Amino acid sequence: MQGAVQAPSSQPGPGKQTLVEQIPIPMVQKRTDGEPDDIAPPTGGIDKAGFIDSSDGANLRAGPAEAGGKLLRDQPLPPATRVFVSGTHPAASAWWYVTAYLEGAMVRGYVQGFRVNTDLPEPMAELHQVAGGETAEKLAVRKFGAAVSDGHDLRYYENVLLYVNQQQQRAGVTGTYQDPGMLGGGANNVQLIAGHRIWLVSPAYAKALEGVVPNGSLTGGAVAKVKRFGAHLKDILHSVTESRHHLGEVAGEYAQAIHDHEAAIIGVVAGFIMAEAASAFLAAVPTGVTQIAAVVIQLGLALFGAKGLVEAGIEALKHGAEWLTLAWTANGDAKLLAAASKEFLKMLVSIAMAALAYLGIKGNVGNAFKIAGSLPTDGLPALVTVGGGRLTEGGGAATGIWIRPSLGSIGAAAGAMMQADKEGGGSSKEEAVADQAAKAKTSRDARLKDLAADPAQGGAVTEKTLREAEVGLALEEAGTLPRPLTRDPTGGAEFIDGVKQPWDVKRFNSSYPPKQGGFTLESSLNKIKRELDIGENVIIDTIDLTPAHVAELRAGVSASGWDTRVVWH
Amino acid sequence: MDFEEELELHTRWNTSLGKDGVLLRHPELDLTGTDLSNRNLSGAEIPGTKFDGARLAGVDFGMCNLASCSFRRADLTGAMLTKANLDYAALNETILRGAKLFRTSLSSSDLTLADLEEADLRRADLSDAVLIGTNLRGATLEGATFAGATLSGVNFEGAQMRGASGMDTAIVNDIRIGPTKSDHLEGTAARDWLLRNI
């Protein structure tokens, strides 16, 4: 197709490389056993980059282990793996939905939330597992080599390692500051401890700390430099994660199709931006936006289940380039970021159209269901090419996530295509279905807002009351609480269910010592008992609890005979 | 990053409902003597922080983790502390006049000489708290629990106490229920008055 984004062929030809060939495309991995993994779409709302910060890594599962969620990889995600956290499991919020770029491939699934650290010292920081024999000097050379001009600089960057990790209370770097002005020789004052994880900040951030390290504190000027540095990247991520708020407005009849893939799309795109491609990304934007857009489009095609498709329309590329340019130049401007989000969505619509056309289901919903149902179980193409390689079908032997185009989403997307073709005789029935889906989403958002407005706080909606609302609504949708759930207008309880039973939400926390609000079994049971004694039932939000504490509390609740009055999320 | 920076990020966290900014999660800050009047810290997790002598009138601490914080001689007049965790907090001589402590957890806190006149303490958890010379004049205590609390020289004049609980296990030494000398009740008389008025 002339003007289309052309993926690299399996036989590299002579002459100029195509756009996609110039940037590595992560592979979307599949399982080796051919079995499908049904991964429940997450409850959104985290949207943060993070790292696996647990010495034994984190198992990647299709769902919570306690609910029988299958392992998606034979090995855990290793310590210090970079991930993007999209949200939490709808029925077990202690499990976080992550997308990781690992060994040249994208993997996704659920991990235990406490194993993920999203508290980065700066947007481009990376967590590093200190290996035996590694020294601060070697690490500084590796990480900051390009910025080091002489021995003076090197000692400065070793001090940066010490400063940043002391600020973050990491135990992997010890010692005292070296004199940056001393040339040659010098003691190895900054030492690494093997087996620990430490933060490595970007060279730009390290530069911004000049005048701070080793003895000072962050000045206003340094803070401003750091903020400017991360702003572009943050704006681009924001335009992706916030796109969900414009679905109904922009995607119209396509909203349901995109909504069905929303978590995967946001996770994969944001994960890609934050991962290996980040530096290339920052270097390319805004002049090389089409290259970046081309890679994102390829990822999107895979997520829409377009097996073997190597082309996407010029429209997708146009919107992709516009998305990146707007986001890059937004400088935090809300209107520009909203416009960027909308362009991102338009790009997704174009990708969905291309994918459906490829699958041959354009204009025929019945065929769409038939084709979706007959897709081979080892379904998706792996987009293989790292370093200007090639695009092939089949995923190789790597273990990872198998992405199955669901019947529902293909059907809905086909409905969207029908609407696109309505000038050629589309079906009003499919239009109605798509309309209904868009309205349902709008209606859910409105309910969430209603449930979040807390009369106990004068009707205020805060992040924490919103969390309460998400928990309550999820339990209502799961059929655990009789519908309709409403906020208790007195503020005495959080919610009142459909049979007028008041419910209080309790959120205990494993992160603090007991006297600083941390979990203890005795105090938690006392607090639950107090609510039960006055006739309220209790919802326990486990998001801040370790699995061990959840198990301990569950046993305590059962032993107290409260199982019928306490529900878990 | 200094506290103002953290607070700015926290404000963005609050206004964006968690989509932007960063939740203020920083135990054991030293904010002694600072002026945070009318600022919004709702949802912050800053247990063990020292606010001694701080000016905190009208501050929004709704749903905050303030366990083990120290507010000695701080001014929290009209502050919003609804659903906050103030377990083990030191509130000695703290001014909490008109403060909103609806469903606030004050378990094992020390409220010695604290001034809670006209404060809203409905459904507050005062279990195992120490109230010595505490002023609860005109306070709303409906549904509050006092299980295991120590009450000594507490002024309950005009306090609304319907539905309060736990008085049977509270240690009641003496209380004041009015301005005259005869309104000072001790021992059994004090406990009986409390049990009659809940």
Image (cartoon, coloured by chain):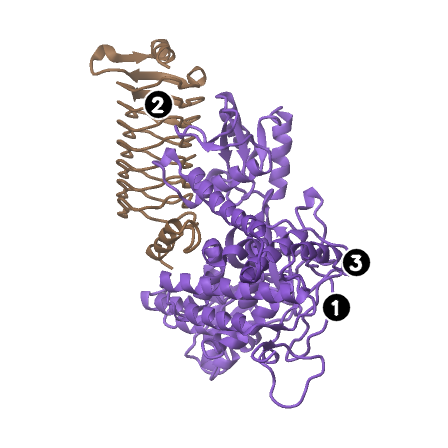
Q: Residue type at mark 2: give it.
A: Leu
Chain assignment, label 3: A
Q: Position of residue A388 (x, y in %)?
A: 64, 80
CA separation, marks 1 and 3?
A: 13 Å
Disc ID at residue B6: none
Residue A33's tag is 3
* CA neighbours of label 3 inside 10 A, class few (<14), some (14 to 19), many (20+): few
- Where residue A256 appears, as percent x and y from the top left, is 56, 53
> Tag 1: residue type?
Gly
Which mark is nearer the camera, 2 or 1?
1
Q: Secondary structure at mark 1?
A: loop
Do badges 2 and 3 share one subunit? no
Tell me the colour chain B is drawn in. brown
- Label 1: how many Cα within 10 Å (few below 14, some 14–19, many 20+): some
Q: Which residue is mark 1?
A: A394
Q: Quadrant of the N terminus of chain A?
A: bottom right
Q: Are marks 2 and 1 on the same chain?
A: no
